Image (spheres, rainbow, N blue to C red):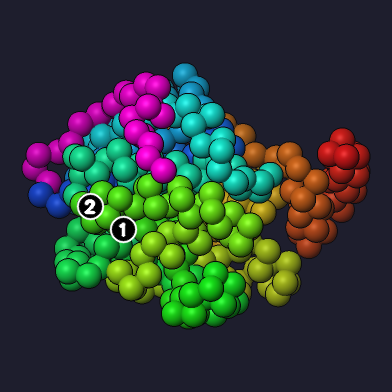
Amino acid sequence: MKLNVADAIITQKSYGKLDENKTAQLDIAYGIDKNFQLGAGVSIVSVVMNNPDLNLHFHIFSDYEDEQYNKNLHKVAEDFSVKITIYKIDDNYFNFLPSTAAWSTATYYRFIAFEYLSTSTEKLLYLDADVMCKGSLKYLTELEFSTHEYAAVVKDVAEIRDVAGTRLGSLTLNGNYFNAGVMYVLLTKWRDNAFLDKALELLINKRDSLKFFDQDVLNLLLLGHTHFLSENFNRIYGIKNELKFKDITKYKNIITESTVLIHYIGVTKPWNTWADYPSAQYFKKAYLASPWSGQPLIGPRTPKQFKKKFRHEKLQGKYLDAISSYCGYLLAKLKSK
């Protein structure tokens, strides 16, 4: 199946400019919908705060446009001397691909980023909007790929990676399955191998066997062509750990001094009103330094989020708030039927 991704882009606008005095350049892309705008904006600020020596160009591919959001991005570009380009995406472009309530078609916008930018950019760092930076990314700008390597990635958590090959019918993936939330991609190889066309074919033909959609497909396409980075470049952390361990300091065993990128997986994101934990400090530091600092954190929308909020507020000793959240959960559950 062949698509021209240029047809997916409705408008394109840029703010700021590259700094010619900085020799090390890094292009970074996000693919988001409305619900992840705040996360992506703060993620950008977390990167620039920790990488003042890099010449940074951020690319945001989104199906939702907001005037105030764009003004904030403009301010980030000016304040931190970086370039930010926004690509407005037709939200119907990938409607023929599988999606769920938890995984919207925005998850495929990384494919548009890879394909569209491959004509102008050699290497691209893709970040999910729930990835925050707390260290230097200069190592990536100096990374040399071998002839058979097309992307630098980090292996997923053991419970996912160790069974992925069996699930997808490719046993070599067992133990080698990567998490697609952080990918440093050699775009020339992406284009030369027509990976967009192959990805779409897999998504259509194997849709019933795919659990993580684009991540599964990327693993199948890049099998044998990955460079595995240290977990410090995609340190996976779920704020549900606070509920599991009942110890708000346990995060230090996972997020350490050498951690560069933190990937906040799960229902609870660091920008949620109930994520009031030290483990979310890396988001909050960038949030307070961003143009979004005056914007409220995000409350619950779905039954799952109301339920998580209820459980976290119980742990935090906010019992009246917890009762209110449980009532919200019951109401949201009733509305979803």
Q: Residue 302's x, y, as percent?
A: 76, 43
For the record, the magenta segment spans: 1-22
Q: Which amino acid does label 2 sit on?
A: Asp
Whichever of labels 2 and 1 marks the residue nearer the N terminus, that label is 1
Residue at image coords 91%, 44%: 330
Q: How many marks?
A: 2
Vertical order, 259 against 293 (above or below): below
In what quadrant of the picture does the C terminus appear?
Answer: top right
Residue 29 seen in render? no
Vertical order, 227 against 93 (above or below): below
Instruction: Answer few, some or many: residues within 10 Å of disc 2's Cα (few below 14, many 20 plus, some between 14 and 19).
Output: few
Q: Residue 276's x, y, as percent?
A: 65, 54
Residue at image coords 56%, 38%: 96
Disc 2 versus disc 1: nearer the observer: 2
Residue at image coords 29%, 26%: 14
**Dot 1: what SS?**
strand
Q: Residue 192 carries which label?
A: 2
The residue at which mark 1 appears reads as 184
Q: Residue 12's x, y, as percent?
A: 33, 24
Judge whether residue 18 is colored magenta. yes
Q: In this view, does 210 lie to the left or right of 32?
A: right
Q: Residue 91's x, y, as percent?
A: 52, 29
Vertical order, 90 against 322 (above or below): above
Distance of label 2 from label 1 (alpha carbons): 17 Å
Q: In this view, does 58 lie to the left or right of 322?
A: left
In this view, the residue in front, 130 or 179, is: 179
Judge whether residue 88 is colored magenta. no
Residue 323 seen in render? yes
Q: What residue type is labelled 1?
A: Tyr
